[in-house]
Image (cartoon, grey):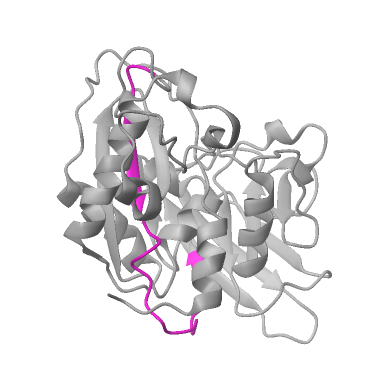
Amino acid sequence: MIKVVSALFIFMILVFLLLAFVITKNPSSPLSIPSAEKLINDLNQYRTSSGLAPVMENRKFTIAAQNHADYLAFTEMKYFVGKYENLHKENPKSPFHSKNGDTIGAGVITWKYDQSMSAVDSLMTAPFHAIGMLREYLKEVGVGSAKVEAGGYSPGSIVTNIAVLNGLGNKGRTKVITFPGANATVKVNNFEGENPEPREACGKNYQNFQGLPIFVSLLHNPSKKIEVKLTWRNGNVLTEGSQLCVVTENNFISTDKIYGPAGKQIIRQENLVLIIPKAPLSEGIYRVEIYEPGRKKIQWSFSYKKA
């Protein structure tokens, strides 16, 4: 069993999150349950593009992840009440409750109604979930998927759950982590949705910020005087304002009583700087520059290309 630093272990237990978004149904794209191999391969493509070591499947974690996916797929809505509205918990009254699903099975979760993009692609558009899969010390994961039955949560969708808690190593951070990674090419370009909502700090019309959340996980707390520049594919330079939203622990807010506190803990613990353009990305090369008083500039480029 991998030993995990106790403070980090407690933190991770506290900050389970739920990704809950719906993609428009596409009859030409029939649903199928993704294999564990595909999910892990997709995840490792993102990890290596961000300069991180690939993860391996742990069968114990996969059994637990599958049990939790089955709980979400087959449990009737009447059991998702009270503290069990948090879908990372399992109501023991459900006939699909399992001990390992309830303890080590839950992770980052998405529901999909079509397969226009993979489950991992969808999760990568949600920064609080993406960083859970891009942690430097993540070594092993488990995966599970199931089709949600009538009467369940998001019936007719495929729920995918990637267990990321118990696969953490015991080493500390050594790298600044960026997404998209330096010189990487990604096939996602817009924000799909996430609980907690990461954009509330972007103003009263925060829903208008539709672009892919770009982020960096620093090795220090971000400065209150941080400045960000995003050079658009056409050469336009965006700074924080009406076309670009920047969210850190210094301005993050959430009205989500269930998942908001967890989001605040994650953005603080991971020293996240979220960079959310108003418009979805268009095909081309983008450049990110981050300035903080007294620190070396962080800069990198990446590309978006439609799949």
> Which of the two residues, 26 or 227, is positioned nearer the viewer here?
26
Residue 126, compared with residue 40, is above or below; it is above
Which SS does the magenta portion mostly show?
Answer: loop
Side (left or right) of 8 relative to 206:
left
Side (left or right) of 10 relative to 53:
right
Can residue 193 be seen from the camera position used here?
A: no
> Which of the two residues, 104 or 48, is positioned nearer the viewer here?
104
Residue 35 coordinates in the image, percent (x, y): 16, 42
Residue at 42% of width from left, 21% of height from top? 154
> Which of the two residues, 96 or 124, is positioned nearer the viewer here?
96
Residue 105 coordinates in the image, percent (x, y): 34, 50
Can residue 304 be seen from the camera position used here?
A: yes
Residue 183, compared with residue 127, is above or below; it is below
Q: Does the magenta stretch include residue 165?
A: yes
Dividing the image into 4 quarters, which one contains the C terminus?
top left
Residue 270, compared with residue 262, is above or below; it is below
> Which of the two residues, 183 or 200, is positioned nearer the viewer here?
200
Dividing the image into 4 quarters, which one contains the N terminus?
bottom left
Q: In which quarter of the image is residue 112?
A: top left
Residue 226 coordinates in the image, percent (x, y): 77, 69
Residue 104 coordinates in the image, percent (x, y): 36, 55
Q: Does the magenta stretch include residue 239?
A: no
Magenta stretch: give its range.
155-178
Q: In which quarter of the image is residue 187?
A: top left
Residue at 36% of width from left, 73% of height from top? 52
Side (left or right) of 66 relative to 130:
left
Q: In which quarter of the image is residue 163?
A: bottom left
Residue at 22% of width from left, 20% of height from top? 30
